[in-house]
Image (cartoon, grey):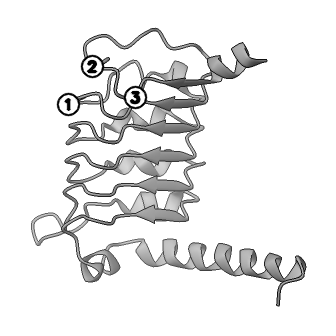
Amino acid sequence: PQQQQQQQQQNHSSTNVSEALPVLPKGLKILLLSNNFFSSIPPTILDKSMSSLETLDLSSNHLAVVPEQISNLSALCELILDDNSIVSLPSSMGQLKRLKTLSLKRNQLTANPKTPQTLPKELFEDTPLIDLNLHGNPMTSTQLNTMEGYDTFLERRRQVKVKFLANLDACGLE
C-alpha cells in the first residue's frame, strides 16, 4: 500500500530536477515540483499520459507562461502556481472540467487597456473553480471585477459557500 501511495504521489520539491525530470509513473495523482528553477513547465508533465494528475504544485519556480497544453491534465482539481512570474493564463484553462482550486499568489497578473482579460473567461465560466487566490499580484479588485466571466465565478462560489454554511447547521451549529 505504501508503494502504491508513493506511485500516486511524487515530491520533487527543491531537488533541482530542472535539467532532467525523472520518469513519472502512469496513474500519478499528486506531483509536487516547487523550488526547481523551471523557466517553463516540462513537456512530460503536460503529456496526455499525465491525465490522471489531480494536484500539481509548481510554486516558486521561474514560470512566466502556462502553455495551452495544460488542458491535457483533464483530472486536475488543484493547481498551485504561487511565486512565479506569470502574466496571464491561456483560454485552454477552461477545459479543466474538475479544477476547483487555483492559487496564483505573488505573480505578475494585472489588467491594462492592452490586455484587459489576463484571466480567461473560460476559466471562470467553464470550470467548477471555487477557490482562486490572487494575493500579491499587481491586479486590482476593480480590474478583476470587470473581467468577462468573473460574475459567473462569484455566483458559483456564493452557492457553494451557502451550501457549506447550510451543512454546518446540520452539524448542530447555529
Amino acid type, mark 1: Ser
Sequence-first tag of 1 and 2: 2
Snapshot quadrant of residue 164: bottom right
State the SS at label 2. Answer: loop
Count residues near mark 2 (Cα–Cα under 10 Å), then give few for <14, some for 14-19, many for 20+.
Answer: some
Q: Position of residue 30 (x, y in %)?
A: 57, 31
- The residue shown at (82%, 76%) is 167
Instruction: State the separation of the CA atoms marked 1 and 2.
Output: 8 Å
Of badges 1 and 2, the one in the foreground is 2
Cα separation between marks 2 and 3? 11 Å
Q: Which residue is at a point 57% across and 55% down the rendered structure image?
A: 100
Mark 1 vs 2: CB contact within 8 A: yes
From the image, tell me which residue sits under label 3.
13
Q: In the rendered view, tell whether residue 51 sits above or below residue 6.
A: below
Q: Is residue 1 left or right of residue 13?
A: right
Residue 70: image location, x then y, percent: 41, 36
* Residue 18, numbered circle: 2
Q: Is residue 157 above or below residue 58?
A: below
Quarter of the image with the N terminus is: top right
Identified by mark 2, the residue type is Ser
Q: Report the residue at 45% width, 63% height from top.
A: 132
Residue assigned mark 1: 39
Which residue is nearer to you in this view: 144 or 14?
14
